[in-house]
Image: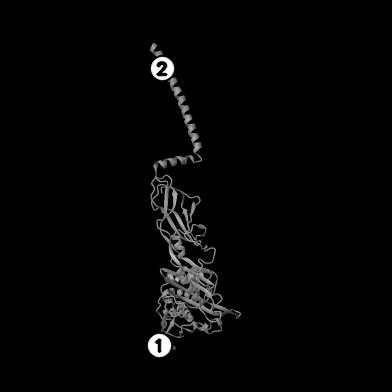
Amino acid sequence: MSAVKKSKGILSFFMIFAIFVGFSSYNKVNAAFVPDVEKIYSEGVYMVNLDTDVVIYAKNEHKRYYPASITKIMTAIVALESCPDLNAKVRVGSDAMNEFWGDDLNKRGASTCAFEIGQTNLTYMDCLYGLMISSGCEAGNILALNLCDTIEDFVALMNKKARELGCEDTHFANTHGLWEEDNYTTAYDMYLIIRYAYDHVPKFMDISDTYSYQFPANDNNPDGYTKYNTNPLISASSDFYLEYVHGVKTGSIDEYYDKDGTTHPGGRTLVTTAQKNGFTYILVTLQAPFYNENGEKYSYSALDHYRLYEWAYKSFAYQTVVSENEICAEVNVEQGENDRLQLAAKKQFSTIIPKDLAEGGENGGSSDQSVSPVQKKVTMLYDNIIAPVEKDEVLGKLEVIYQGELVQTIDLVAAKSVERSQVAYIADRANSLTDTSWFFPLLMLLGLCIVTQLILYSVRRRKLLQEARKRERMRRKNSYK
């Protein structure tokens, strides 16, 4: 574009189209969608479709809860990123187990991997499987003491990593998740943690998704022994088994004791992922009841995951919101062979939506813009577009706002080239002169100059004529002599 008048204030206009019906904005309610399930027992929930980053369901996602053994997710992340050789042997000392034998009631009865003090055949990899599959609390301490001088130093690395990931409401106090007052997290923060592990930590998902693991022999298990994953959603014998669920970690505290010795009911936590029909999800649930109404143990966290996944895979589909090269706006062009120019989307954008609404969108959807959870907002980069314009030149931005959240920004480009019209260019330049503050004063000055020149010319011409007549008279006078 040869010349552009840049914006003094951004010129923008809105193109709002209805694709969906009947859902409120995510900013107005604490859940992106309303799950069609009987009940969600967990107090804190965060469920995200990883293919589109759309929040499918959220409940108290920024409220702090005790994480229990899903603390071990961060333990595994730090260990995997800190250990140079996972097949190296580890030292198993009493300092990794002493806290489970002390006076702290919250540390008694901890789940273990049956590792033994002085055992010399364990590797870092064995400890990671013990940590994530059988939820061995001593495995977390063994990893910490072999990678750092103290457990406290290792926990400091866990908190440092949490801060790096943007977790604003998370603090870890140990490697295993047994109750401590300053060991807490939120559903949203735990999503950030597991999303990082899922995307960036090699071996993490392979370890956490393993159903069983054979551990090396020790004094109490001379032939070695097998431990099984505590996650019921990946156990084929469980009522909650879903073949498309993978990993990640369970957590549970039946009850805990505060500093005054008062007993409080605990709860269950669970983090899983799922992959099916091209869709991938992460689901975090916190503080589900540990017991049912009859006082019996029941995995309400697993029930929540089972119901939410089955609902999601039954209910959602992909829809193309913006197609590549789709015409999204039409603008004026100054000094061009054509005075109108269409702007096209540079790339395609698709997202996940309820199937019934996708079908409605394909048939034209609703015309009621006020209830549509998807909006397209077009913003021009310049107040005026002046020819020449090259095809595919970026002239604007298209913001896709879904459920009240900005989910995508797409460049808007010229759909074709526009050549400059010389006639229009000259006319526009001429017109532009009249819009300046100095045009009329200059015009008056120019007029005054012209009048002055005319007067001077007239005076000079009269003088020349007089001189010519004088010379003629002198010539005639001389001719008579």
Secondary structure beneath label 2? helix
CB under 8 Å between callouts 2 and 1? no
Determine the image quadrant of residue 319.
bottom left
Question: As displayed, is residue 298 above or below residue 351?
Answer: below
Amino acid at the residue labelled 1: Asp
The numbered dot on residue 380 is none
Q: How is the image coloured?
A: one colour
- Find disc 1 in the rendering and name its residue: 223
Residue 153 horizontal/vertical position (percent): 50, 75
* Residue at screen point 45% across, 22% down: 463
Q: Tally the numbered discs.
A: 2
Residue 169 horizontal/vertical position (percent): 53, 70
Specify the farthest residue to the top: 481
Q: Nearer the viewer, residue 207 or 304?
A: 304
- Left or right, 238 with respect to 105, comes to left
Which class describes the residues within 10 Å of circle 2: few (<14), some (14-19), or many (20+)?
A: few
Which class describes the residues within 10 Å of circle 1: few (<14), some (14-19), or many (20+)?
A: few
Question: As displayed, is residue 473 above or below residue 355?
Answer: above
Q: CA distance from mark 2 to mark 1?
A: 144 Å
Amino acid at the residue labelled 2: Glu
* Residue at screen point 47% across, 68% down: 48
Secondary structure beneath label 1? loop
Determine the image quadrant of residue 481.
top left
Whether residue 389 is visible to the viewer of this picture, yes or no, is yes
- Find disc 2 in the rendering and name its residue: 472
Q: Nearer the viewer, residue 314 or 463?
A: 314
